[in-house]
Image: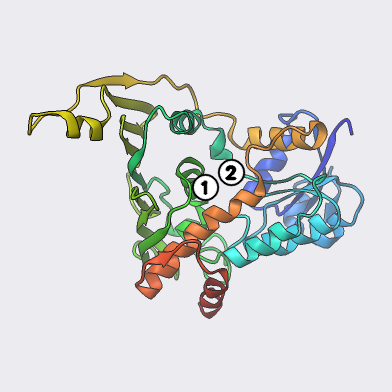
């Protein structure tokens, strides 16, 4: 293939953005070959592109090599499975599914290595997080001891939640801030630090909005090696905060307000504690501000990478199979809050599916 014929299923907020980006020629070698939406008004905005009213129609049309799924969350699973079984390449918006069991079903449908299956985790293209990941993976930070992420700049108004009947409902979205806004942050969390061994969380239902799902969350995560983490998020705080702090043996990293600050210990903190004869001493430090420019290619870069993966076999930035981890973290936080228990990881996908069905 010289170009990728892409179809977009779902012309809501993100679907329209992706369609406009491709039509503007911003994704080389990617052509918007078809669109799909159940609403005729949505299709009318793309009269020059073949339109379909159902996912099955566009999948079986022969007009597309791949689909981008940008529908409400639950249908990511069923549409994704249908597209994979039809032999199409698939790019799915976040979250890849609502709950872990559906993630397992969707991932299991990807049986051919010839098919590219990716997820829209665009924040993996952000150089701030890429730099942090490199510092962790190269050992420059040493052993991580504590992680704190306050991510409350996801402020949403009552009008936002009223904009679609599926929003902020268990039946429509399967959750609130953890399933809609925070899949990005939860994906970055596991991408940077791996998966915890236990999760304990408190999720407030409709603390700031008249909704039936969580809009305020505080979670405590613990790792097998004793590393601990606190994850705080909300859609009701203004002004919000986005502050990621990582404490490790060789110092502390703070990413906030477009700055990457690394306070580096000259001696690892545990080694200094063991070796110094002074009771109130601290290691000498270097204060370093690591230069980082911009926030990467974001959605466009994921689309470009997906296109290159199909045409050139370029490695994916965000394989869809990795999307199960952010969903599992969200599920564990919600289940922990409702059961008032610490959830061991990996969590039972069947247990959470039963819980969600009751909701």
Task: Work out how far the residue at label 1 is from the one at label 2, CA to CA, in angstroms.
Answer: 7 Å
Above or below, comparing residue 241 to residue 182 in the picture? above
| Callout 2 secondary element | loop
Q: Position of residue 185 (x, y in %)?
A: 47, 46
How far from the left and from the top, in percent, is residue 52?
83, 56
Label 1 crowd bin: few (<14), some (14–19), many (20+), radius 10 Å: many
| Label 1 residue SS | helix
Closer mark to the observer between disc 1 and disc 2:
1
The answer to whether marks 1 and 2 mark residues whose Cβ atoms lie closer than 8 Å is: yes
Res 48 quadrant in image: top right
Residue 331's place in the image compared with 287, above or below, is below
**212 sits left or right of 65 in the view:** left
Which dot marks residue 121? 2
Q: Where is residue 245 shown, x and y percent of the image?
A: 33, 38
- Residue position marked by numbered label 1 in the rendering: 187
Q: Quick one: quadrant of the N terminus?
A: top right
54, 195: nearer the viewer: 195
Q: Residues within 10 Å of mark 2 (few under 14, many from 20)?
A: many
């Amino acid at each position: 293939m010289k170009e990728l014929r892409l179809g977009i299923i779902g012309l809501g907020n993100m679907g329209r953005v992706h369609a406009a980006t491709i039509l503007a020629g911003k994704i080389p070698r990617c052509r918007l070959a078809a669109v799909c939406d159940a609403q005729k008004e949505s299709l009318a905005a793309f009269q020059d592109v073949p339109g379909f009213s159902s996912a099955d129609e566009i999948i079986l049309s022969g007009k597309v090599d791949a689909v981008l799924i940008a529908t409400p969350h639950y249908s990511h699973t069923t549409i994704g499975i249908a597209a994979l079984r039809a032999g199409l390449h698939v790019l799915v918006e976040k979250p890849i599914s609502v709950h872990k069991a559906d993630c397992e079903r969707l991932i299991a449908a990807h049986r051919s290595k010839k098919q590219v299956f990716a997820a829209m985790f665009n924040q993996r293209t952000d150089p701030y997080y890429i730099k942090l990941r490199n510092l962790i993976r190269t050992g420059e930070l040493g052993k991580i001891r504590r992680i704190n992420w306050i991510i409350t700049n996801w402020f949403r108004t009552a009008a936002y939640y009223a904009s679609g009947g599926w929003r902020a409902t268990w039946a429509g979205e399967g959750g609130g801030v953890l399933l809609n806004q925070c899949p990005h942050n939860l994906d970055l969390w596991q991408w940077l630090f791996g998966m915890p061994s236990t999760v304990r969380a408190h999720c407030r239902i409709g603390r700031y909005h008249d909704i039936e799902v969580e809009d305020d969350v505080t979670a405590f995560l613990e790792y097998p090696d004793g590393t601990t983490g606190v994850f705080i998020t909300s859609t009701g705080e203004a002004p919000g905060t986005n502050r990621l702090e990582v404490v490790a043996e060789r110092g502390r990293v703070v990413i906030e307000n477009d700055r990457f600050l690394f306070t580096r210990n000259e001696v690892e903190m545990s080694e200094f504690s063991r070796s110094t004869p002074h009771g109130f001493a601290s290691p000498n430090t270097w204060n370093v501000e690591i230069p980082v420019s911009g926030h990467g290619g974001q959605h466009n870069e994921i689309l470009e990478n997906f296109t290159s993966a199909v045409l050139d076999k370029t490695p994916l930035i965000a394989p869809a199979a990795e999307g199960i981890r952010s969903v599992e973290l969200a599920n564990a936080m919600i289940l922990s809050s409702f059961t008032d228990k610490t959830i061991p990881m990996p969590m039972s996908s069947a247990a959470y599916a039963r819980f969600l069905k009751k909701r």
